[in-house]
Amino acid sequence: MTTTAAAPSTTAGSVDRSELRRDLRQLTDAVCADHPDPYWREVDEARRYPQEFVDALTRTGLLGALVPEEYGGLGLGLGDASVVLEAINANGGNAGPVHAQLYTMASVLRHGSEEQKRRYLPGIATGEIRLQAFGVTEPTAGTDTTSIRSTATRTDDGYVVNGQKVFISRVQHSDLMLLLARTARREDGRRPSDGMSLFLIDLRETSGVDVRPIRTMVNHETNEVYFDNARIPADSLIGEEGKGFRYVLDGMNAERILIASECIGDGRWFVGRASRYASERQVFGRPIGQNQGVQFPIAQAHVHIEAADLMRWRAADLFDSGLPCGAEANMAKLLASNASWEAGDVALQTHGGYGMAAEYDIERKFRETRLYRIAPISSNLILSYVGEHVLGMPRSF
C-alpha cells in the first residue's frame, strides 16, 4: 500500500479541532503503516536518513502544517502539528528527521520579512525546500546560548560569518538554516542576550560552510558545522539586528512543545508494547502481567504519560493563542521526556532479554527516547528555569 491522500483542508475559524486532529492522526497512521517496524530497524542499522518516509509524509502536505494557507501550507496551529509528531512515534517511527521543519517555522512566521516568507514558505510547504537545520549550539557555550562566539560581521553587501556550531542535525538534508550569531560583543550590550542576530541562510548558495558528521548512539544525523568567512546577503537577517535571541525563543518554545509530543508518542508505544507482551508472555503457567510487580510499573508509566500530555496541551494552547508559554513549554518537555524514559525502562524490563533484541524494537526506541532528557535542553536547566522564573528563587548558576 502506498499512501497518497492529502491532509485535510482548513479554513480559519471554521475548524472543529477535535475532528481535524482525528483526521491528522489517521493520515499519519496511514503513512506509518507503509513504514512498519522493519523499515525503521533497517534505517537505524544502516544509519541512513529515512528518505522514503519523509517523501511520503511530504506528499500528504503535513510538513507544511504550520505554513499559512496564503503561502500554500495548511495554516494549522502548533497543537495540530504536534499530533502528527506524536502519531509518528506512537506508531514506532522516529519523528526526529522531520520535526525541525515544524519548530523552525515559529521564528520565521513571527519575525521574518514578507519577502523572506514569499521567497521560501511556498517551497517549504510543498517540500521542494527543506528548512531542517537550526544553528544555535556551540562547543564552548552549550545551553548558555548568550555565550556563543560565532560572529556575523556587517559588510557593504551583507555579512561574513565565522565560527563553529555543534550538534546541528540534518544539515545534509536541509536547504536552509536558521543561524544565530553575534553581530555585537556580549560585553557591549546591556544584557548578555543583546547583540545576537538571527539569519535565514540558503546553504545551497553559501560557500565557506564545512559540515562534519558526529556519530552518536542514535540515528540522528548530527554534525559539527564550521563557518569560514561564509558570505551571506543582508536580506538573510530575520527581524532587527541584535534581537535574535528573543526571536529564537519563539522557536525554542515550539521545539519544546513538539518534542514533548514526540515523547508522549514514544511513551504510548512503550506502554502498548509492554502491556501486550505482559498479557501474552507465559511464565510459571500464567501471564507475567498477572504479577503486580510487572503490571503496576506499566500502569504507573501510563499515568505519567497521560499527565504529561495535559501539560503538553496547556503549553500548545498558550502558544497558539500568542500568550507567554515559556514555563509551560519547559515543564511539558520535562514531564514528557521523563515519562517516556520511564515507560521505555518499564518496557525493556517487561520484555527481559528479548527487550535487548533488535527484532523487538524496544532497544531502538529506548535509545531514541533517552535523547530527549538531554536535548534540546537538559532536565536540570529546566528545573533551574522553573526555580528562578516561576518560583522566584535565586538563580542557581
Image (cartoon, rainbow, N blue to C red):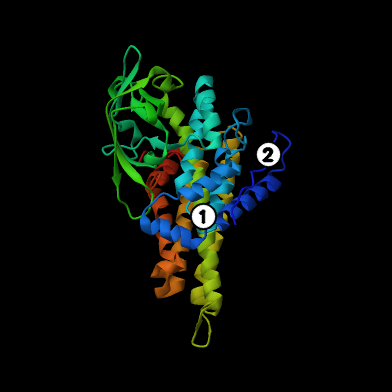
| Farthest top residue in view | 156
Identify the residue at horizontal 38%, vertical 44% (top origin): 381
Asked if one can make out residue 330 in the rendered structure from this viewpoint, the answer is no
Number of labelled discs?
A: 2
Residue 6 drawn at (x, y percent): 64, 44
**198 or 386, which lies in front?**
198
**Is tag 2's residue or tag 1's residue first in the polypeptide sequence?**
2
- Which residue is identified by label 2? 9
Q: Nearer the viewer, residue 210 or 140?
A: 210
Q: Is residue 212 left or right of residue 302?
A: left
Q: Amino acid at mark 1?
A: Asn
Q: Residue shown at 42%/59% (left/top)?
A: 42
Residue furthest front in the image: 1
User: Cβ–Cβ below 8 Å for labels 2 and 1?
Assistant: no
Q: Taking the image as drawn, is residue 185 in sight?
A: yes
Discs 2/1, front: 2
* Label 1 CA crowd tier, 10 Å (few <14, some 14–19, many 20+): many
Q: From the top left corner, tell me how far across and down residue 159 is, in percent.
A: 33, 19
In the image, is residue 27 above or below residue 397?
below
Q: Position of residue 177 (x, y in %)?
A: 41, 32
Looking at the image, the residue that sits furthest to the right is 14
Quarter of the image for the N terminus: give it: bottom right
Residue 89's label in the rendered image is 1
Q: Which x, y percent locates residue 226?
A: 27, 34
Secondary structure found at label 1? helix
**Farthest-out residue, bottom:** 285
Depth check: 322 or 203 in front?
Answer: 203
Which amino acid type corresponds to the residue marked 2 in the rendered image? Answer: Ser
Disc 2 residue crowd, few under 14, some 14–19, many 20+, Cα 10 Å:
few
Which structural element holds mark 2? loop
Res 198 label:
none
